[in-house]
Image (cartoon, rainbow, N blue to C red):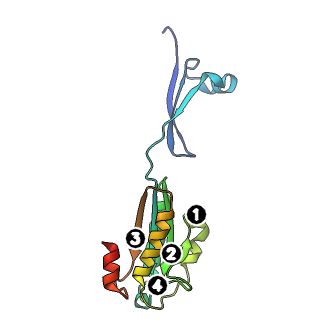
Amino acid sequence: IASEAYVGVIVDRSVQSPVFMVSPAGGIDIEEVAAKTPEKIFKQRVDRDSPNTAVALLMDRSGSMRDKIELALDAGLASAASLESIPGIRVWSGVFPGEKSPVESLKGFDERLSKVAQRHRGVRASGGTPMADAILCCAELLLAAPAPRKMLFVFTDGEPNNLPQTAQLVR
C-alpha cells in the first residue's frame, strides 16, 4: 500500500443529513487527525431534498361534532405529531368555529407540539359549522407561510353551514 486515505460517511443528527469526510492523512485513526490537524479533514454535507411544506390541520368543533370531537382532536394530534417528525414540514393546527374568529389556533407553525399539546384538551363542541370561512382563514395562513407547498386537512363530519360555498372553495 503506497498511501492511506480516510473516506467516510456519517449522519449529522442535528440536520438529519449525510456528511462525506475525506482525509489524505487518515487511515483508521481519523479521531487523532481530527484532534491534531483538523484542517486535513475535508467535509461536505449533502443537503437532502426536504419536503419544505406547510401543513394546516383544521378540526371541526361545531355542535354536530359533539359525539366526535375527541376523535377529531386525537386524530389531529396524532397527525401533527407524525408530520412534525418529518424534517422540512411545518405544522399548524386549529379548530373552527373559534371563540372570537372563524378559526382558533391551537399550535402555531413555529411551536413544538410537545409544548402545546394540552391546548387540544378541553376543546368542546358548540356552534354552527362555518367551514367556508374556516377554509378561507387557513388559506390566508398557508399563503403567508414561506414553504412552496401547502396542504390543508379538515377533520369534520362534513356538515357545513353553507355547502355550495364550501364546495366551491374546495374545487
User: Which residue is rendered at x = 35% and y = 75% of the image?
Assistant: 169
| Mark closest to the chain's N terminus, 2 or 4 | 4
Q: Which residue is mark 4?
A: 61
Q: Residue at x 47, y 75 (%)?
A: 137
Query: Which circle's residue, 1 or 2, is located before the other in the chain?
Result: 2
Instruction: Using residue 81 as the reference point, say whether residue 115 is left or right of it.
Output: right
First in residue order: circle 1 vs circle 3: 1
Which tag is nearer the camera, tag 1 or tag 2?
2
Task: Indicate the secondary structure of the residue bearing disc 2.
Answer: strand
Residue 118: x, y in percent?
Answer: 59, 75
Residue type, mark 3 in image: Phe
Q: Amino acid at mark 4?
A: Arg
Can you give x and y, in whole percent of width and height, for residue 127 in the image? 47, 91
Q: Amino acid under label 1?
A: Arg
Q: Nearer the viewer, residue 25 or 168?
A: 168
Label 3 crowd bin: few (<14), some (14–19), many (20+), radius 10 Å: some
Q: Which residue is mark 1?
A: 112
> Marks 1 and 4, Cα distance to the nearest angstrom?
22 Å
Q: Which residue is mark 3?
A: 153
Between marks 1 and 3, how big is the CA–CA gap?
19 Å
Q: Nearer the viewer, residue 43 or 32?
A: 43
Which residue, as the protein is rendered here, is positioned at the far right?
36
> Which mark lies nearer to you, 1 or 3?
3
